[in-house]
Amino acid sequence: MRSVTRSLRDAFGQFATGVAVVTTATPDGERAGVTVNSFTSVSLDPPLVLWCLSRRAPSAPVFLRAGRFAVNVLGEDQGHLSRRFATPSPDKFAGVETRPGPGGLPVLAGTLAYFACRTAGVHEGGDHLIVIGEVEHFHRAEGDPLVFHAGGYRAVSAARRVLDRAGA
Ligand SMILES: Cc1cc2nc3c(=O)[nH]c(=O)nc-3n(C[C@H](O)[C@H](O)[C@H](O)COP(=O)(O)O)c2cc1C
């Protein structure tokens, strides 16, 4: 029999989202990166975003210690980065192209956008922490997003063209 948790997870999964990798670095150089689909914009003035971090994630203490993070929004061709940062590993960054962003945050190359944030609040959210960030720097590029729906990755570029033609 399917557990309620499994069914709830599946029902949550009907809400299609983008995919981001949230990265951080502490002043002493420890880095962490986590694939998330819980990212959302919150406020334009002041500029705030949020994402939810599992309390059980091994990298959670690094994010809390660093007090800052970068949200890297993945493009359609970056499923490999989503998989990489969703898999526990001692060095997720090995072989991944990054550049030093504001305050030394590791910023992933070739993404659709990034938001460099100062952690403005961390709130209880059951088995997750709700992390609020104030956006200090951001960058936007052109491209189609990586989409996550029903436990799998999706591409919207083909569907977008069809909907555009239909005037939807
Ligand atoms: C598409 C996708 C979305 C995810 N979203 C989240 C999320 O919003 N919050 C979270 O804590 N983990 C999320 N995860 C799981 C983490 O990426 C995964 O547990 C990762 O290993 C945590 O990093 P760590 O092991 O370095 O702590 C997601 C995984 C995938 C594949």
Image (tube, rainbow, N blue to C red):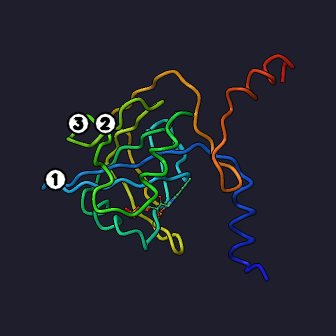
Q: CA distance from mark 2 to mark 1?
A: 17 Å
Label 2 sits on a secondary structure element that is loop
**Which label sits on residue 105?**
none
Number of callouts:
3
Query: Label 2 is placed on what type of residue?
Result: Glu
In the depicted structure, whether residue 135 falls above or below residue 31: above
Label 3 sits on a secondary structure element that is strand
**Local crowd size for mark 1, using a 10 Å CA cut-off: few (<14), some (14–19), many (≥20):** few
Q: CA distance from mark 3 to mark 1?
A: 12 Å
Residue drawn where x is 47% and y is 71% of the image: 124
Q: Quadrant of residue 88?
A: bottom left
Residue drawn where x is 49% and y is 54% of the image: 51
Q: Which residue is mark 2?
A: 97
Rendered location of residue 103, percent (x, y): 21, 40
Query: Label 1 is placed on what type of residue?
Result: Gly
Whether the residues at callouts 3 and 1 have beta carbons within 8 Å, the answer is no
Q: Which residue is mark 3?
A: 100
Q: Viewed as shown, does residue 150 lie left or right of 70?
A: right
* Residue positioned most to the right: 166
Label 1 sits on a secondary structure element that is loop
Observer-nearest of 159 and 126: 159
Q: Which residue is mark 1?
A: 29
Q: Viewed as shown, does residue 37 lie left or right of 103?
A: right
Q: Quadrant of the C terminus?
A: top right
